[in-house]
Structure formats: C-alpha cells, structure tokens
Image (cartoon, rainbow, N blue to C red):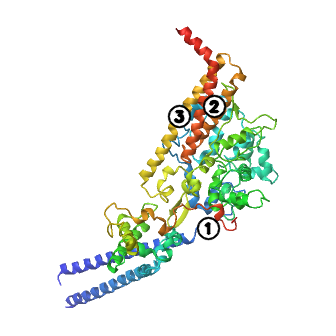
C-alpha cells in the first residue's frame, strides 16, 4: 500500500536529514571552535615562550618586570612557575590555564593578582631545583615544612625586579649624563 | 519501528541540535570576548572631538577618554575613612571646628573660625568654595588658582600671558574674579586640561604658583633626594630656571600635578599667591621663609592677628606635597598618583584611576602592588600610624588651649604686650606646627616620623609659651588663691 511504503521512505529521509543536520552543526561547532582556538593563539600555550603568557594582557606587568629581574637571562616563566616533569607540567598548565581564562573572561578576580599556595610550592621547588645544592643545609625538603620560609620571601626581586612601584628610586647620579 | 522509538529518535536529534547549538553559541561568545579584549589592548583611545588649551569642560574630553572621565566623575561620590572624608549630610559636610573646639579657638580672628568643614571630592571644589561662610569676610581672587580650571582666564587677564594674568589676579575680590570665570565659560572644577597637554595627553603642570614655587625650591640648597631631576638641574649650568615640564621625570610629574594645589601657600589680598618653598619643604623651612617675608608695605608677614592674644599667626593650608616629601614613600620613588590614582585594569586596557581618593578605599590597587600582605593587615598598619598621630595632635590641641588661657590670665593680671612678646612668639611657632599637621590630609601617614617631630615641637613651644605667660599671670593666680583661703 502506498501509505505503508511511505513510512520506511520517510524514516530513511528523516534519518538522512537528521544526520546531515548534525554533521553541519558539528562542522560549525568544530569550525568556530577551531578558529577560536587559532584566534586565541591556543597552540602557543603548549610552548615555553614567555610571550604566550602575555597573550591575555593581564600578565603584562609581570612579563615586563621579569625582563628587569636578575633571572631573566637564565629562567623563563615556566622554569619557575611550572613543575619540570612532563606530567606535572601539563597538569599545572591545564589547571592554571583554566583559572586564568575563566578569570579573564568573567573579569572577577582579585587585583593585583597574587600567587596561590599551590603555585608558591611549585615556585619554591623550582628555586631548589637549581639552587638546592647550595641551600640544602638551610631548607628542610623540596617543598619544605608548612610555614617554612620561602626563598622569595627575602629574594623577592630575583624574578620580577625591585618592587618599587611604578617609578623607582632613580637618583640624580644614576641619570645618564649626570656623572660627576 | 514503533511510534515510541520514532519519537525518541526525533527527541534525540532535537536534543543534540540544542546541545550543539548552545555549545556553538558559547564558543562564539568566547570568540567575541577574545576579540574585544584584543581590540581593547590595541586601541587606548579614539580622538572623536578636538580639545585644546581652552577646553575646560571635562565632558568634551570625556568623549575621547571615556574611561578616565568615568572615574573622574566619581569624585562626586561621598567617601569616608576613619579620619578623612565627611560625616554630616550629603548637602553639607560636618564642621571640623565644632568637632575639635581647639581648632576654632586657634583660628579666632580668621575666617576659618567661622566655617571649616570636612572635605568633599574634587567634583565639589568650586561649589564648596562658592558656598563657604568664609566669603562673608573679604577674600582674594587668588583662591580660584586651585578651585577652578582657571588658565584661560589668566591668559585673558594677562593679554595672552598667563603668568602676567596670574600676577594681577590677587587684586580682584573673590566674587569679582568668580563672576568673570563663569562669564568666560570656564566655571569648572579642576579639569583634564589642568594636568594634561591636549595634543599629546602628556602630564604637565600649569599653575603659576607651583611653577614659581618649585623654581625657588630648586634654586635653594634644601636636600631633595626624592626629586632627582632637581638635583640634576642643580649640578648643571643653571642658565635657565628649573622647569618642571621640561626637566621633571615622569615619576615626578605624577606628584607635581598634585603639588600644584595640595600645598601650603599664602592666598590673600596683600600680595600674589605664594608657595613658600624658597628654603625647603619642611615645616621649619617654610616657617623660616615666612618669617623672612615682608609684605609690600614692609611689615613682617603674617596671616592673621589672633583675636584673643593679638599674636601674628601663620595659618597652614593642607601641606600634603610637603609632608609626603619627608616620607619613605617619596624617598622610594612612589608618586602621589601611585596610591591615589593607581593603575587599574578595564578589560585589557590599563587606565589610571581618576577617582582620586584615599588609598584606604582602594588598598589592593594602591598598596598591594608593592606590599604583599593581606588588605586587613595593611589597613591595620595604617590605622596604627594614624591613631598615634591623632592622639599626639589632640594633646597639642590641649596645649594650645592652655597657652591661650595663660595669655588671657596674664592680660587680666595687667601684663603688657611687651611682657607677653615671648609668649606670643611661642604661640606663633606652636600654632604653625600644630596646624601644619592638623590641616594636612593624611593624619600623619605621609611621613609619620616627621609629623611626630613637628607635633612634638608644637607641644614644646605651646608649653614654653604657657610658662612665659604664667610668669605674668602668677601674681593674680597667687592673689586668687589667697582670697579663696
């Protein structure tokens, strides 16, 4: 019967249309998503280039002050701020990346930005990764005891220069051409 | 396939369409957000209207620089801290002279004993000045130097030369110059053009009082470790006078623009507005400058004669720039704007907050950029400094009242002006110092040790004056005691 024949035909039709529709939608999502990833320079976050850290502008002050810190020639952002082992590094990247993009998108974070305890522990471990041999008499363990003094408590200027606000105590005899 | 199954697969398709649709919308929103931030980072401003030296209306500048204008407008908002800002109604802040009666006693014979209220924000500087009861006494046109966007009017008065116009302005009564200001269309409180070059947006100073004052300061030999460009100028040939707009560093300019007004000055009818910086910036330096200043008629400088004692008093006006200069923040290269107009982020753009206010209302941006402690800890440290300054200052108020009482008693006992000369000189010294810290708007925070030293001197001079007066009041005191027996 014509009517009974029509049903399987429609079914096939609706299945094909549905599949096509889904493919288009998935394609749109993939395209927009892919372009967003590209536009947001998503791949750069897999690199170790400090420029990637200023993609989203919040870190500009930190980036610029790092260039003035004594460690800028020997350590990039990730050398101090991410674990050095492969898995730990990518876990920390993912976790911080999530917090940073959520914060920057919704604009709801405390300013100025301050390091959290978990990241401070990573930082301390990285100080010791290079300087551990020199200070093993002073520091208990890699992550230390809770409340144990952190290297940067005293050596706060090594990473990001002197914290003299935005000006700096430039003295007359430091200004070029005024040597006397 | 049953009807049920068909319904299910249709629902699944619709569900999937919805999920993918929402996901796509979210990703697109994120894309737009990223795009906005990127644009913000690239385009600090768009010059839509032209502004020039005569554009005193901040709203016009606000078209080009909406973010700065937006925060500038917030200076109309009432703010309070423990020691600053105002109680009282929205319409009128509280009278300081009612809260601290020793202030009123100190100012007897001067218009500040009539009306002296808590401060309001920049937005009110002109209206508050137009409404004060101090205007019931004759006031000079000089006062508009710092309460209005007055540079075009100075140029008009001086035939194009602002410095010349400024030199004439003290001869006008306040009311006359104020009328001219409004007629010329420049009746605005401090405005963008007062601190910014309209072409380049660069910070610059415009106020003649400041330019004269800083030139005299540079030419002096007062140590100024916090102003390196002055020391650099001093080491040079000195062929040209020190010019803050040419010689000043960017950091210094971020304090100089505030120093155009937040200073001690003379502002009355006998001579042009004067910043007393020719011997340095400390309270004792400024006192020395005033003591050596003579009015055009040859008389020694004073602001008013005290109505009770007859002493020739120096009145201090809010010397914020001077006290800041003695503190550790100035010495470390921290400018006024670093704490009072800290940088803030708006999206991906960095703007200087033009809602000029107490850093205590903005501890995270103002302090935590350098001081890595919790906001509560920082606020508690400031509170401790200010409380101690307040306590010492109140002690000074008590001492001044005791001095004035002693002088009155001596007068009643028949002491002559000659006999009281020492006591009156001590009153002048003590009041100058007490007022220097009381009128200053940081409750000692700008330089805690300097503030304590100035207050300590005030206390000492007040008590020395009291002793000097009591020598002549003593016979009467003894008599009164004898009669009481």
Q: Residue B95: horizontal and vertical position, in percent?
A: 56, 34
Q: Is residue A97 visible?
A: no
Query: Of callouts 2 and 3, which one flags the residue occurring earlier in the amino acid sequence?
Result: 2
Secondary structure of the residue carrying numbered label 2: loop
- Residue at 62% x, 41% y is B128
Return the disc, 1 or 2, that comes first in the chain's sequence.
1
Distance Cα–Cα, label 3 vs label 1: 52 Å
> Dot 3 corresponds to which residue?
B394
Residue that lies at the very extreme toward the left in this rendered image: B2
Side of A8 where B170 appears, left or right:
right
10 Å crowding of disc 1: few (<14), some (14-19), many (20+): few
Residue closest to the eye, B146 or B56: B146
**Residue position marked by numbered label 2 in the rendering:** B107
For mark 1, name the chain.
B
- Residue B430 position, x and y percent, is 62, 34
Q: Are marks 2 and 3 in contact (CB under 8 Å)?
A: no
Residue lying at 28% horizontally and 85% vertically, measured from the top left: A14
Q: Position of residue B143 (x, y in %)?
A: 70, 42
Depth check, mark 3 against mark 1: the one in front is: 3
Q: Identify the mark at residue B46; answer none if there is no mark.
A: 1
Q: Chain of mark 2?
A: B
């Amino acid at each position: 019967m014509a009517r009974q024949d029509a049903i399987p035909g429609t079914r096939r039709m609706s299945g094909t249309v549905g599949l096509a529709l889904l493919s288009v939608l998935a394609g749109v999502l993939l395209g927009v998503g892919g372009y967003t990833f590209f536009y947001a320079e998503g791949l750069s976050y897999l690199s170790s280039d400090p420029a990637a850290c200023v993609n989203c502008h919040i870190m500009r002050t930190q980036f610029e002050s790092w260039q003035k810190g004594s460690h800028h020639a020997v350590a990039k952002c990730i050398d101090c701020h991410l674990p050095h082992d492969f898995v730990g590094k990518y876990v920390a990247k993912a976790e911080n990346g999530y917090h940073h993009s959520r914060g920057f998108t919704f604009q709801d974070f405390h300013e100025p930005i301050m390091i959290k305890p978990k990241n401070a522990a990573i930082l301390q471990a990285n100080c010791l990764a290079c300087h551990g041999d020199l200070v093993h008499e002073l520091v208990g363990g890699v992550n230390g005891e809770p409340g144990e003094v952190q290297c940067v408590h005293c050596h706060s200027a090594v990473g990001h220069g002197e914290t003299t606000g935005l000006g700096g105590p430039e003295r007359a005899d430091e200004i070029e051409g005024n040597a006397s | 396939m049953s009807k049920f199954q068909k319904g299910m697969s249709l629902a699944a398709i619709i569900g999937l369409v919805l999920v993918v649709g929402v996901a796509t919308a979210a990703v697109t929103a994120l894309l737009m957000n990223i795009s906005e931030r990127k644009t913000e980072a690239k385009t600090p401003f768009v010059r839509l209207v032209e502004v020039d030296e005569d554009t005193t209306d901040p709203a016009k500048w606000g078209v080009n620089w909406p973010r700065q204008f937006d925060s500038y407008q917030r200076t109309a908002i009432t703010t309070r801290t423990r020691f600053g800002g105002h109680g009282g109604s929205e319409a009128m802040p509280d009278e300081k002279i009612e809260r601290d009666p020793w202030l009123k006693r100190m100012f007897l014979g001067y218009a500040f004993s009539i009306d002296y209220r808590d401060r309001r924000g920049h937005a009110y500087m002109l209206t508050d000045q137009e409404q004060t009861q101090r205007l019931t006494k004759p006031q000079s046109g000089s006062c508009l130097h710092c309460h209005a966007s007055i540079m075009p009017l100075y140029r008009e008065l001086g035939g194009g030369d602002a410095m010349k116009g400024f030199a004439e302005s003290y001869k006008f009564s306040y009311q006359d110059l104020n009328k001219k200001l409004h007629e010329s269309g420049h009746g605005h409180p401090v405005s963008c053009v007062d601190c910014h070059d309209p072409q380049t947006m660069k910070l610059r100073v415009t106020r003649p009082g400041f330019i004269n004052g800083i030139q005299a300061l540079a030419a002096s030999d007062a140590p100024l470790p916090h102003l390196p460009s002055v020391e650099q100028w001093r080491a040079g040939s000195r062929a040209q006078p020190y010019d803050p707009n040419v010689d000043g560093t960017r950091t210094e300019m971020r304090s100089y623009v505030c120093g155009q007004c937040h200073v001690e000055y003379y502002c009355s009818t006998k001579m042009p507005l004067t910043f007393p910086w020719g011997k340095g910036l400390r309270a004792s330096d400024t006192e020395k400058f005033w003591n050596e200043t003579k009015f055009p008629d040859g008389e020694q400088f004073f602001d008013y004669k005290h109505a009770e004692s007859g002493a020739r008093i120096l009145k201090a006006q809010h010397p914020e720039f001077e006290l800041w200069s003695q503190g550790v923040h100035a010495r470390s290269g921290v400018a006024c704007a670093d704490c009072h107009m800290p940088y803030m982020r708006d999206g991906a753009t960095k703007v200087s907050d033009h809602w000029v206010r107490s850093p205590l209302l903005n501890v995270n941006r103002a302090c935590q950029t350098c001081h890595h402690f919790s906001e509560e800890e920082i606020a508690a440290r400031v509170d401790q400094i200010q409380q101690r300054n307040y306590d010492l200052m109140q002690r000074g108020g008590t001492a001044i009242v005791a001095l004035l009482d002693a002088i009155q008693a001596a007068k009643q006992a028949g002491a002559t002006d000659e006999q009281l000369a020492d006591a009156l000189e001590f009153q002048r010294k003590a009041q100058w110092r007490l007022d220097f810290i009381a009128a200053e708007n940081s409750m000692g925070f700008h330089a805690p040790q300097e503030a304590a030293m100035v207050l300590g001197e005030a206390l000492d001079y007040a008590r020395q004056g009291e002793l000097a007066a009591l020598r002549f009041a003593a016979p009467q005191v003894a008599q009164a005691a004898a009669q009481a027996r």
